[in-house]
């Protein structure tokens, strides 16, 4: 069967179970876009900026638990994807980005809209390809999806010269991908499993620390069973929120720079950490030499490079989080339950005491709205069932602290790279993946402006996303650092000169509501969530509210600034 | 932590861009490359990279794991952990005035090198050996006046044990 390169691309994308792609056309991709619109079973969502396409594909992956796809043209189209690719790379999100490229004969000639995107994205993709031989096109696409999804997932970029897309090729479905140089190890070492069980028996003050790896390996059920079986309290990284129910009594809250007092104190005082799918990022560990000074560490990760990278561990296990936890649970079930929970009441009482004395708190007064109050009300009204995306900064931390996630894949944020402008396109991607879910972008007034053009994408495609702006007229997280560490010199962080977000929503064909009164927060949220279509809710909040607790950069986790 | 020299033998897919992935990994993560040498093996689809680096024990663990994580890397062999033979090839062009010629040839003979080019006022000498031999040889030639040097990186293979 003779097909063009563009036809093969579409066929192979569909064969991977992908039903939606996010794209923006250009000279080098006309052939692909011309082909896509002939396929009713492959939806193309036209974004308004290529960065939006990549963030949307990222969130589509996370909400739908399959691989997101972005399609952009050569040159500037390709370079505009770099931030989104780097974000997906930092967060280990499976994604395939297809870029158009100038015809192979022109590559290297500095042609119009030519850029070496394979060279540019080499350090921020899991792998990337330039397809130069039309006969290898189908196999390369299949390999790209295989690499993106398997092992520790990540973004893969495929660069497609225009002549390859136009070439007529004898098409055959490629055989199953096998790579001699890439064989991720999913199965844990048996001896290490026995060691884990012994370490749990020996522990008096254990903590489970779960991360994004638990979400991506879909192991939240196993984490929950492990916690409950051995009565071990659970904390997570930002990326791990939802891996364990946020309303469970064993829940400690998030760990790290803006983690809860009890989570950070637990790590400072525990004698065992069971770290699952985490990489001990500096925002989580604080001062690394003072991190968990009394604890032995078990680390479970699919990626050997994550182990021993920042922290020495006593029991490393390379394997899939879910498979490994299943193995641990199977062995634990054979033990005497009393031996797995020695002196646990003492430990849990201590933690409860930390919770009682120093909970997360804010003081909602009558005259001005506190941003935390908005998020907490949002949680109440949506019963914790909404998919929450965030921008980056204070809005992100308050969403993490006050929306008590019970379910995995419901918190979608740019964790590792921290990309402002992520939330709105991510909400669009999540809504495309889960049309029946309520999707809310918790935004700041600064970062929402970074990809505000995607409002049009949401409205045009009837992807009804709800945007909650915590509007403090500051670039709030930087302002907070300036307040604490730069003598309140608010250099370049005052953004009072802002658009009217209600009118802006209306200009794009969405709806907008503003709220300035604490008494009206709940009504505004209900009205906004009930209004069909895309909605902006602009909450004018306390200008100089800060995120607490805070571990100053380089400080020990247990040395927190509290309100 | 204490640093030492490590010699890695890496088999990779013989594809465009593989070397830049490896070089990029080192520069991006602040690792150090002392020397590098690359050529195809008997299998035309596979190249062998021999790389020398100086670092501490924790960093070499990361380097090995990060290299292995690259999709095009087939195996990473740390030769420093075992017995191996190491060679480095250099061409050394040295001033050879008539009164020094005999002495240069004696040194060449002692080091089992070869003169591969002769002029009225110079010799070009080929030397092969490990880096210690190279250093000793060059220190003896230095007083004669070295004109220029071209040197490869180290190449090495593990010894076959018990055969």
Image (cartoon, coloured by chain):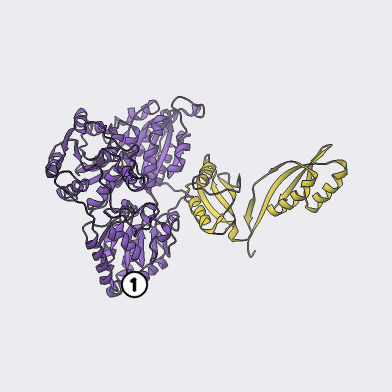
**Residue topped by disc 1:** A201
The image quarter containing residue A99 is top left
Determine the colour of chain A: purple
| Image position, residue A555 (x, y; %) | 38, 55
Q: Residue at x 22, y 62 (%)?
A: A356
| Image position, residue A66 (x, y; %) | 31, 45
Is A403 on the left-hand or right-hand side of B138?
left
The image quarter containing residue A543 is top left
User: From what the image shows, is residue A163 above or below residue B133?
Assistant: above
Circle 1: element type? helix
**Residue occupying the far front of the picture:** A487
Mark 1 burial class by Cα count in 10 Å: few <14, some 14-19, many 20+: many
In this orientation, which residue lies closer to the viewer: B69 or B92?
Answer: B92
Is A509 on the left-hand or right-hand side of B34?
left
User: From what the image shows, is residue A82 above or below residue A239?
Assistant: above
| Residue A4 shows up from this direction | no
The image quarter containing residue A544 is top left
| Image position, residue A11 (x, y; %) | 34, 36
**Residue occupying the far right of the picture:** B99
Is B45 on the left-hand or right-hand side of A290?
right
Q: Which chain is yellow?
A: B
In this orientation, which residue lies closer to the viewer: A423 or B65?
Answer: A423
């Amino acid at each position: 069967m003779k097909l063009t390169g563009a036809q093969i691309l579409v066929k192979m994308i569909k064969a991977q179970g992908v039903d939606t792609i996010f794209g923006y056309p250009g000279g080098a991709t006309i052939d692909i876009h011309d082909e896509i619109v002939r396929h009713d079973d492959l939806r193309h969502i036209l974004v308004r900026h290529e960065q939006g396409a990549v963030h949307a594909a990222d969130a589509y992956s996370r909400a739908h638990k399959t691989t997101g796809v972005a399609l952009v043209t050569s040159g500037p189209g390709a370079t505009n994807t770099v931030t989104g690719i780097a974000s997906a790379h930092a967060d280990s999100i499976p994604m395939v980005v297809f870029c158009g490229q100038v015809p192979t004969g022109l590559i290297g000639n500095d042609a119009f809209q030519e850029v070496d995107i394979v060279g540019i994205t080499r350090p921020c993709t899991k792998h990337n390809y330039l397809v130069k031989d039309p006969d290898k096109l189908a196999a390369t696409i299949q390999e790209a999806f295989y690499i993106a999804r398997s092992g520790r997932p990540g973004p893969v970029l495929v660069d497609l010269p225009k002549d390859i897309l136009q070439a007529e090729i004898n098409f055959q479905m490629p055989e199953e991908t096998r790579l001699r140089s890439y064989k991720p190890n999913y199965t844990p070492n048996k001896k290490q499993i026995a060691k884990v069980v012994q370490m749990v028996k020996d522990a008096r003050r254990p903590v489970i620390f779960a991360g994004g790896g638990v979400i991506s390996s879909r192991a939240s059920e196993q984490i929950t069973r492990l916690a409950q079986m051995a009565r071990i309290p659970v904390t997570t990284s930002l990326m791990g929120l939802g891996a364990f129910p946020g309303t469970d009594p064993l829940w400690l809250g998030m760990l790290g720079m803006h983690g809860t007092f009890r989570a950070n104190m637990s790590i400072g005082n525990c004698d065992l950490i069971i770290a699952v799918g985490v990489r001990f990022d500096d925002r989580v560990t604080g001062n690394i030499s003072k991190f968990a000074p009394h604890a032995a560490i078990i680390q479970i990760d699919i990626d050997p490079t994550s182990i021993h990278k920042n922290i020495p561990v006593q029991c490393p296990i390379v394997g899939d989080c879910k498979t490994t936890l299943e193995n641990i649970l199977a062995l634990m079930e054979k033990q005497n339950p009393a031996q797995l929970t020695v002196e646990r009441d003492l430990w849990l009482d201590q933690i409860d005491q930390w919770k009682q004395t120093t909970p997360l708190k804010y003081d909602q007064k009558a005259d001005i709205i506190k941003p935390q109050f908005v998020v907490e009300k949002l949680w109440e009204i949506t019963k914790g069932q909404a998919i929450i995306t965030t921008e980056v900064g204070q809005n992100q931390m308050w969403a993490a602290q006050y929306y008590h996630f019970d379910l995995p894949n419901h918190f979608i944020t740019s964790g590792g790279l921290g990309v402002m402008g992520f939330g709105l396109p991510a909400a669009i991607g999540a809504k495309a993946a889960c049309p029946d879910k309520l999707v809310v972008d918790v935004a700041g007034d600064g970062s929402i402006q970074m990809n505000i053009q995607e409002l049009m994408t949401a409205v045009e495609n009837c992807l009804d996303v709800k945007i909650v702006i915590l509007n403090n007229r500051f670039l709030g997280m930087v302002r907070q650092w300036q307040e604490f560490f730069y003598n309140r010199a608010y250099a370049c962080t005052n953004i009072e000169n802002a658009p009217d977000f209600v009118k802006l929503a209306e200009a794009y064909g969405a709806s907008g509501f503003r709220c300035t009164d604490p008494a009206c927060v709940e009504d505004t949220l209900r009205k906004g969530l009930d209004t069909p279509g895309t909605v902006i809710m602009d909450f004018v909040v306390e200008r100089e509210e800060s995120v607490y607790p805070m571990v100053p950069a380089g400080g020990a986790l247990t040395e927190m600034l509290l309100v | 932590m204490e640093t030492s020299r490590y010699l890695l033998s890496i088999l990779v897919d013989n594809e465009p861009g593989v070397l830049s992935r490896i070089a990029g990994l080192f520069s991006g993560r602040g690792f150090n490359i002392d020397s590098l040498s690359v050529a195809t093996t008997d299998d035309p689809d596979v190249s062998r990279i021999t790389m020398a680096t100086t670092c501490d024990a924790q960093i070499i663990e990361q380097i090995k794991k990060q290299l292995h994580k690259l999709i095009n890397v087939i195996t990473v062999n740390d030769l420093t952990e075992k017995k191996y033979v190491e060679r480095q090839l250099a061409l050394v062009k040295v001033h050879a005035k008539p009164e020094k010629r005999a002495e240069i040839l004696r040194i060449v003979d002692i080091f089992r090198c070869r003169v591969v080019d002769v002029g009225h006022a110079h010799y070009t000498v080929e030397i092969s050996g490990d880096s210690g031999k190279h250093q000793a040889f060059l220190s003896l030639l230095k007083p004669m006046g070295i004109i220029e040097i071209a040197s490869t990186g180290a190449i090495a293979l593990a010894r076959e044990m018990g055969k």
